Image: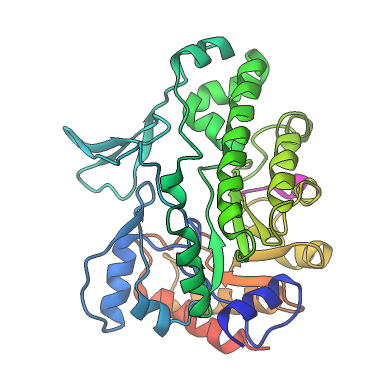
Amino acid sequence: MNSRERVQTALNHQEPDRVPFDLGGTPMSGMHKIAYRNLRAYLGLPEVEIRVVDSIQQLAAIDEDVAELLKIDIHNVAPRSSAKYNLEYRDEGAYTAYTDEWGIGWRSPKKGGLYYDMYSWPLAPFDTPEEIAANYVWPDAGDPNRFAGLRQRTLDTIEQGKAIVVGSLSAGISEMHAWTRGFEEYFTDFYLYPDVAEYIMDMVVDLKMIYWENVLNEIGDLADVVIEADDLAGQKNLFFSREMYRQYIKPRHTKLFSFIKARTNAKLFYHCDGALLPILWDLKESGIDVLNPLQKSAAGIDYAAIKKEYGNDISFWGAGVDTQRVFDQGTPEEVREDTRRNIEIMAPDGGFVCTPIHNTQATVPPENYMAFWETMQEYGVY
């Protein structure tokens, strides 16, 4: 059984030979460049120039020697950027900064900075859809440069036996409302300017549909997993009421997910951190097949109960080790114990791809990463 067959079997809620493993296959299962450098040294691999594939999170591209050594089953064939946008870093005194293709400003402290944080929002000044339409230029989601060479890269990956994962145009529908407006406006728009909230989310849906139509025209017959996301919850609660989610966001999720699934048999992977349990069935009704990550430190996230209630309908991608309380702070033995318990709950009957709950942060010791990986190798066999 090769990696692609292993992932397909698991996502069809059957047990493969072993639990599939992901490192670097999604923007939520990667490794910070510092942790990656440390892991390579710990494994005795040669120094290489580390390529950053996610500028915000500073995630490293996973090189082939690591992928081979750790038996990674997943490969992301994410399309390219638009030819109309070039990532250019600039000096802003104590910060290094850049502006993305949506016009959002990001910066990182030169001293001690590990990531880039938002600090300017292009739609913050506007309070009507008409103002936005008159003053803002949306990205070109259908730029052919994004999709150049995509089918050949996918065929090459299939030849290697890896499962094919395809990334999205951007963060989620609701997230892009927050990222372009700023969080204060985001939370108040639903009450003060609902027409603005709906206009922005509708524009993002339209752009995503343009993007996915192009992607799936190229590789809809080859893709195994397509990624969408929307962080809708915090540590303790949803960001808004379930009723507000059902009014504003669920219909747009359903529209987008239906559009995607009409064009491919790939599984729809959906990322949402936090205490999302009150809307989990809603997300399934909207069309998700796979949930990432199941943040066990969030309110209401009980792995055994969720696996029992939802495990026949939703696959889980993540849930390998607690990245908030154990992975960087615990001992290797504590990492092993957490990983073992999680696998014993999540692996039966398939529907599970193992990776840490979120990206491996810069502070995770390589000893802890390998304690997780070795435990998965031991207990992830069917």
Q: Position of residue 307 (x, y in %)?
A: 76, 67
- Type of secondary structure dominating the magenta stretch: loop
Q: Quadrant of residue 309?
A: bottom right
Quarter containing the C terminus: bottom right
Was residue 275 drawn as part of the magenta stretch in this picture?
Answer: yes
Magenta-tinted stretch: 272-279
Q: Quadrant of residue 135?
A: top left
Quarter containing the N terminus: bottom right
Q: Position of residue 154 (x, y in %)?
A: 50, 66
Looking at the rendered structure, the number of numbered marks drawn on it comes to 0
Pick the residue in front: 138 or 200: 138
Was residue 320 drawn as part of the magenta stretch in this picture?
Answer: no
Q: Position of residue 133 (x, y in %)?
A: 52, 15
Q: Position of residue 180 (x, y in %)?
A: 48, 28
Q: Is residue 297 visible?
A: no
Image: 278 above or below 140? below
Q: Quadrant of residue 14?
A: bottom right
